[in-house]
Amino acid sequence: MRLSKAFIHTLYEAPKDAEVISHILLLRGGYIYPVAAGIYALLPLGHRVVQNISRVVREEMNRIDGVEFTMPVLNPAELWKETGRYFDIGEELIRLKDRKQREFVLAMTHEEVVTDIARKFIRSYRDLPFMLYQIQTKIRDEARPRAGVIRLREFLMKDAYSFHRDFDDLDEYYPKVYDAYRKIFERCGLRTAAIEADSGIMGGSGSHEFMLESPNGEDQFVLCSHCGYQANTEKAVGVKPRIQELKDPENAPPLEKVHTPNIKTISDLMEFFGINRDQFVKSVAYLADGKLVLAAIRGDFEISETKLRNHLKAIKMEMAPEEVLLDKGYHPGFLSPIGINDPDISVVIDSSLGDGGLMVAGANEEDYHYKNVVPGRDFDNSTTVDIAEVRKGDVCAQCGQGKLEIRRGIELGHTFKLGTKYTDENSMNVTYLDDHGKERRVVMGCYGIGIERLMAAVVEKWHDENGIIWPVSIAPYDIYLIVIGKGEEEKNLGQKMYDTLSNDFQILWDDRSESPGVKFKDADLIGVPFRVVISTKLFKENAVEVKVRETGEVFKCAPEEVSGKLIELKDKMRTSLR
RNA sequence: CGGGGCGUGGCGCAGUCUGGCUAGCGCACCUGCCUUGGGAGCAGGGGGUCGGAGGUUCAAAUCCUCUCGCCCCGACCA
């Protein structure tokens, strides 16, 4: 391809609203064009990279018996009402009506449609298992798109759905997807951490996130450098150090009510009582699916709303509005699990309150706190759960030795064992007849990869001060061809070189009448793996020059040898990605 | 949704506080000459309702009100 015809427009300066490196380089290189917040056009170069990534994804999906197909983005609302997601998901799901006022949604994933299709065709155990996948546009009205193409409102996702006779079969298939994902990311030049994840509203029994560690990541995960334990912060468990042993619980002093006018926050209380953060019982009220919940945790921990929500199996959860509490006779700032005897309120105690004593807690009365609180004596802590956010430096609960670190990462893929969430009788009700003629429920898994995000992640990892360094597997072109000198000989040799190399490579021939410097800069910025230069000087010694973008290595060779050398080099680079 | 920042030719910016003459600079673009190993040079040229609406004023890019858009931090995140 001649550059003059390729619609490639690089930018000398990046638009000022680009801050993260992948955003800057993709913009400058002419890969993407912003159309609206979180919505981008893929310019020809970006399009080619996405096609190449898609090819890698397809190869690996096909290898584990995936079958590609396509589902519509515009979905009838009924399907989404059937699974309940129409009601469970907030404004992120775009809802609209057609001219006849029929309700539709723009699909953010495709469980509804694929499950609908599956139930139309699955009759017998002989129809199972199978896996369908597509690479299709997803629409999510994110509250805050960010980091260029890392978090978009419209994006391409490879989404795959597997259907099984039972959980055993899903359990057997799931690791194959896991391996395929590993391979996909490796072939794109990325080493990902597969971490235990929260399955959130998707439900199901198991879930992994494939994270690329990156300072520009929008996600956090927890890592134990000692045992290698890795988990999403929403799932990670740390050891909670015991702070206070009560020496003589039998003779502990009784509860004592203390007047604490308008002193509500832990910081204010610390000052007032002159004691440490970990000697308080922190209580927070939530409204979980409309039901009041009081969560209590030791003052030096934060409540993980995700853990709490999962524990409660709640779909929607928010901090209880003040009016609701006051209406019930409770006072925010003075809450505690002590003396709560209300069937309308469930109490959840974090395991940090499993022991210790002589703490301070709210008195459930305006402007009063209790001191000398002993968990277990003054409130029931016979059942505790973990609802604490893991902290940096907490001891790893897995090995009991390492300290947990919190890292940022980009979530490239996510796999879920969905189980029967979508096939249940109160969802889409998908069954088949087993070999005894007995009706049984289909079990599902689903697996996603964000395509543009993967492209951005590769740039985050593979760049230098001059531009992008594409892995050979997904580069938009293999070779950037530059002819220096306007003589006929050079031009002819350029054409000949182009023709020869075209058999084995995708070539971008910079045929502009720009100065060499401009071409070199653009070659580096665009970041194709090899640069081939022909010049008057080289012409005289019957040589061409090759530069390897990744290593910066430059060598000369005879024109007739270039092809062979590059085939060899590219092959080597490709295998190093596996 | 809360907090912060920014909207001036395609891109990057100055001018705004303290209203005033033809709205300026670099890059890019067009024409000509020249030039081909790391974002060349010279000469000439085109392109901007200053995000939008309303208001104040003799006069608004500049002051006031409203509004839209974009970016960043946080909350949220199948």
Image (cartoon, coloured by chain):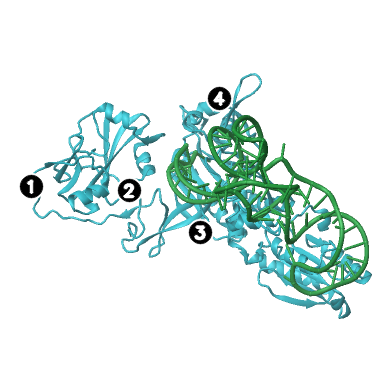
The numbered mark 1 sits on a residue in which chain?
A
CA gap, disc 4 to disc 2?
Answer: 39 Å
Residue, disc 2:
A302
Residue, disc 4:
A78
Q: How far across and down, in percent of the image, does residue A6 sit?
A: 80, 54
Residue, disc 1:
A253
Same chain for mark 1 and mark 3? The answer is yes
Q: Which chain is cyan?
A: A
Q: Residue at x 11, y 42 (%)?
A: A256
Marks 2 and 1, the one that precedes in the sequence = 1
CA gap, disc 3 to disc 2?
Answer: 24 Å
Disc 4 residue type (three-letter): Glu
Disc 1 residue type (three-letter): Pro
Residue, disc 3:
A215
Marks 4 and 1, the one that precedes in the sequence = 4
Marks 4 and 2, the one that precedes in the sequence = 4
The numbered mark 4 sits on a residue in which chain?
A
Is any atom of residue A557 visible in this view? yes
Tell me whether circle 1 and circle 3 mark residues in contact (CB < 8 Å). Answer: no
Q: Is residue A324 above or below residue A402?
A: above
Q: Residue at x 59, y 58 (%)?
A: A21
Please name whichever residue, A344 or B27, is drawn nearer the observer in this view of the structure: B27
CA gap, disc 1 to disc 3?
Answer: 50 Å
Q: Colour of chain B?
A: green
Q: Residue at x 63, y 34 (%)?
A: A73
Please name whichever residue, A62 or B21, is drawn nearer the observer in this view of the structure: B21
The numbered mark 3 sits on a residue in which chain?
A
* Badge 4 element: helix
Mark 4 residue crowding within 10 angstroms, few (<14) / some (14–19) / many (20+): some
Q: Is residue A273 above or below residue A339?
A: below
Tell me whether circle 2 and circle 1 mark residues in contact (CB < 8 Å). Answer: no
Disc 2 residue type (three-letter): Glu
